[in-house]
Image (tube, grey):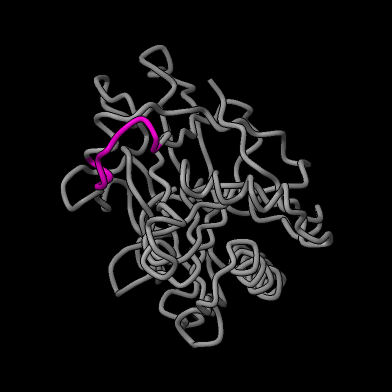
Amino acid sequence: MSAKLPRINLNKPVSSTLASDLKLALRRFGAFRLVVAPETRQHCPDVAREFFTQPITAKTDIKGYSPFASERVRGRAEIPKESIYFFRHGAEPNHLKGPSCNLYRSVKSLHEGWTPIRLQLLKTISQALDSDTSLTGTTLLDSATIGIHYYDSRSLPDFSAHFSPPHMDSGTLTILFRSHNENDGLEIADLETTEKQDSEGVGSEASFMHVPTFGDDAPEVVVFAGTRLQRLLGRDRVRACVHRVRGPGPEAHNNSGVQRLSIAMFCAPSGPSTSPPS
């Protein structure tokens, strides 16, 4: 079953009906969709795929790069992916040469183009939820880290069901730019189907729903509420989205495999720890 999420268009006022749908979705799923202009997506996916095809020796010493299976969910489960992060803790990296140069330029353009969009989005959420709590206006709240994640099913253990197990993201919002694959495995928990609060408990008990994509040219992205937004606005208004990425199944463990790429903008990520996968 697919999750039906409300769609926000920042170029249009939020109607009372849409505000009501958004409130329900943030309590039930902690997620919604955002309509965007096609040019705001830039060309990151193409240059990102080119970056990840580089030999490991060319990537290992690049600041922000996380090698395959070097990150863990809840400090235990290894995640079968490799990643590169930009603007972590507000710092602008120095990627002026090597295989990350073109990718950095593309990500920087994405980061700059999205700064006013995400700030407007956060203000719109406050207004739609009738909240006086400020979600912008400080260095921390206005910061964003961009993480690019690459998964290859050929690297999955034969017994593994997921590219990424159930987890919540830290921070206020995660804005997720997805690959073109219509069935890329992204699933979100229906939080009404469990009384558990932690991501591990939710993951073992809740029903999960598929979140379909609409192609690389689709004018929308998926937005997840994070644990910081839940703390700021209260659990009665917002639940942090518990999401996972289902693997393609044992039949994909072959020479060609299935590759998945996602680009996540973590708004106001917390602490110095690694941003969770998406």
Which of 101 and 20 lies nearest the eye of the viewer? 20
- For the residue pair 70 and 131, the one nearer the viewer reads as 131
Q: How many marks?
A: 0
Q: Is residue 258 above or below residue 228?
A: above
14, above or below 124, in the image? above
Taking the spot 46% from the left edge, 47% from the top edge, the residue there is: 27
Vertical arrangement, residue 71 with respect to residue 205, above or below: below
Report the side of 143 relative to 121 (left or right): left
* Residue extending farthest bottom: 138
The magenta stretch spans residue 192? yes
Left or right? Give the position of 186 relative to 62. right
Q: Quadrant of residue 211?
A: top right
**x and y, in percent, of residue 105 in the image:** 65, 70
The residue sitting at the top extreme is 251
Which residue shows up at 50% across the image and 61% down it? Answer: 173
Magenta residues span 191-200
211 with respect to 154 (left or right) = right
Q: Is residue 39 magenta?
A: no
- Write down the quadrant of residue 228 in the picture: bottom left
Residue at horizontal 33%, vertical 46%?
A: 167
Position of 80 relative to 206 (above/below): below
Q: Position of residue 43 (x, y in %)?
A: 71, 55
Position in image of residue 224 (x %, y %): 50, 52
Where is residue 237 drawn, in percent x and y? Answer: 46, 57
The residue nearer to you, when weighing 148 against 200, is 200
Seen at 51% across and 46% down, the residue is 53
